[in-house]
Image (cartoon, helix red, strand yellow):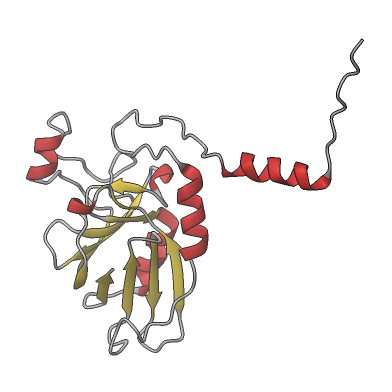
Amino acid sequence: MTKPIPRIFDRRGFLAAGAAFAATPALAQDVNGADTVEIERDLSQVVRRNISSFRALDWQPYFSSLANGAVLVDITSRALHYWSEDGATYKLYPSSVPLTEDLTRRGRTSVIRKVEGPSWAPTPAMKKRNPEWPDFVGPGPDNPLGTHALYLSWQYYRIHGTHDTRKIGRRSSNGCIGLYNEHIQELFRLTKVGTQVLLI
């Protein structure tokens, strides 16, 4: 009769097994019912990158001055930074960013218009990709721009709110930068026409 081999669980083995389990990618549930949210399959990578990159920054490497205030959008960390003109106010918000690199625009622009309760219409390129989308959506809970929008000098590009909170922190837009409605409301109050904007 053979003796059963005893199972030995020491602390080192337990920790190694736990680390291996933690390193296994988590699979995201498909939540793409309205074709507006990108399905990110490996959430562990997204969370790890955002935690390490989502940090306070200094404005000097990005702007020569804080004239009219400054907004920095970091596409990689999916974060929006704001500095007031006098440098006394600094805000850091999680954001949504464009779905793909070809929808992403980087460089310097500025706020040219501010709208509370914006309406929305898809761009010609968006309508071509999604012919089933409506031609126009007025202000309200179905509006993809949320409660407030900052229009940039680049045509079709905005920093705006969203009623779909699943989008924040993800690659989920067609080019715009999205914020939680409560954050865009605050940023809307802080910025003005002429606020400088840099997307990196």
Q: Is 21 positioned to the left or the right of 12 in the image? A: left
Q: Nearer the viewer, residue 30 or 178?
A: 30
**Rendering quarter of residue 111:** bottom left
Q: Can residue 110 be spotted in the picture?
A: no
Residue 160, given in percent of the width and then of the height, sits at 30, 56
Residue 80, given in percent of the width and then of the height, sits at 38, 66
| Residue lying at 62% horizontally and 42% vertically, measured from the top left | 20
Q: Can residue 46 be spotted in the picture?
A: yes
Residue 187, given in percent of the width and then of the height, sits at 37, 67
| Residue lying at 33% horizontally and 61% vertically, measured from the top left | 75
Q: Quadrant of the C terminus?
A: bottom left
**Residue at the front extreme, as displayed:** 1
Q: Is residue 43 above or below residue 48?
A: above
**Rendering quarter of residue 8:** top right
| Residue lying at 19% horizontally and 47% vertically, measured from the top left | 120
Residue 69, given in percent of the width and then of the height, sits at 32, 81
Q: Nearer the viewer, residue 137 or 166?
A: 166
Q: Is residue 146 above or below residue 197?
A: above
Q: Nearer the viewer, residue 200 or 188?
A: 200
Q: Is 26 positioned to the left or the right of 79 in the image? A: right
**Residue at the top extreme, as displayed:** 1
Q: Is 183 positioned to the left or the right of 75 in the image? A: right
